Amino acid sequence: MVAKKIAVIGAGNMGTALLRGILASGWGEKAKLVASHPKQEKASTLAKELDIKILGDNAAAAKDADIVILAVKPQILGSVLDELTPVLRKDQLLISIAAGFPTSRIESAVGMNVPVIRAMPNVAAIVKASATALCAGKHATTQHVAEARKIFESIGLVVELAEYQLDAVTGLSGTGPMYIFQVIEGLSDAGVRVGLSRDVASALTIQTLMGAAKMAEHLKVHPAVLKDLVTSPGGTAIAALHSLERNQLRATLMDAVEVATARSKELGQAHDAKPTTTAR
Ligand SMILES: NC(=O)c1ccc[n+]([C@@H]2O[C@H](COP(=O)([O-])OP(=O)(O)OC[C@H]3O[C@@H](n4cnc5c(N)ncnc54)[C@H](OP(=O)(O)O)[C@@H]3O)[C@@H](O)[C@H]2O)c1
């Protein structure tokens, strides 16, 4: 992609991960990147580290950009859009990563035929292993989707979906790293429980997780087939599986994804309300 001027509004965890991904991609150019952060001290530390401009003023950051990435929390996106609207033009592309915030809300807040893309990456963007789903708003063309794809491919895998599926994506892969961190902690504790040191238990857990994930990725078979590979008659795996089934591991995961999906929908409806809790 010919380097476009990109502004990242809200250089927090995800905004910074995107900036790093773009910078490492080979097509991103430092001189064409700008970001905003409300805290002066954080802004200058980050500016020094990434060697790009980080401004305290969102509108000033967005003004000359070709692509504006909205990476603030969903609860303040409404007020940030109010700040940006006076400087936005309809030849700019707006990309929002805010959980639950529909493209139609952004389009009507901005009040012109501005192209909007909604994206749901995940925190593994920090290590360039995000899983991102993208959808296009009413005025976004295939060219805009291609530009957004290029940006998010710099931090991992990208899929394109219809917008009605984005809350489900938020519940599954947007929130997903947290499920896996719980699994890592639980298995690592289990290793300590059966007599291993914390370091050994953690290293074995993480490698086992990555090995199992690689098998699922490469062999492309249903996970039940992979489970059958390890469960020999009367062996340890089938004994452990019986315990997981008794304790309803799969139903627990399904419940978690379902409530996170519902919470994403709620955020989409209530983003203008004063936040009572912080939200992903
Ligand atoms: N984290 C995830 O796993 C994840 C995954 C997918 C999507 N998302 C979405 O990504 C967005 C950012 O999440 P995050 O986890 O990166 O949160 P974050 O680390 O809190 O980043 C948001 C950043 O915006 C800054 N900010 C606050 N008020 C601002 C304002 N008025 N103007 C400009 N910047 C402002 C915050 O500064 P302060 O810290 O000083 O308040 C913070 O640095 C959210 O919409 C979230 O739904 C997050």
Image: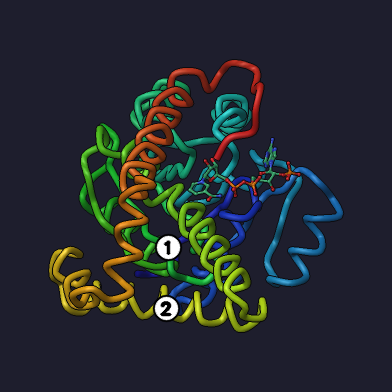
Q: Nearer the viewer, residue 223 or 54?
A: 223
Image quarter of the C terminus: top right
The residue at 42%/69% (across/down) is 154
Label 2–label 1 contact, CB within 8 A: no
Picture coordinates of residue 240, whole percent (x, y): 35, 65
Horizontal and vertical percent position of residue 160:
23, 51
Q: Identify the image quadrant of residue 217.
A: bottom left
Neighbour class for label 2 at 10 Å: few (<14), some, many (≥20)? few
Colour basis: rainbow
Q: Which residue is mark 2?
A: 208
Amino acid type shown at disc 1: Ser
Return the residue found at the far front.
234
**Which badge, 2 or 1, is on the more N-terminal residue?**
1
Q: Residues within 10 Å of mark 1 (few under 14, many from 20)?
A: many
Q: Element at badge 1? A: strand
In the rendering, at what x and y percent does residue 95 appear? 43, 45
- What residue is disc 1 on? 130
Q: Residue at x 62, y 78 (%)?
A: 195
Eyeballing the image, is 74 above or below 273? below
At 48% from the left and 57% from the top, the residue drawn is 177
Residue sitting at x 71%, y 56%: 54
| 251 relative to 46 in the view: left or right | left
Instruction: Indicate the secondary structure of the residue bearing disc 2.
Output: helix
User: In the rendered view, does 253 fall on the left or right side of 193?
Assistant: left
Is the CB of mark 2 within 8 Å of ligand 1?
no
* Residue 54 visible here: yes
Amino acid identity at mark 2 = Thr
Q: Is residue 32 visible?
A: no
Distance CA(mark 2)–CA(mark 1)? 20 Å
Q: Quadrant of the N terminus?
A: bottom left
Which-is-in-front pick, marks 2 and 1? 2
Rendered location of residue 20, percent (x, y)? 57, 69
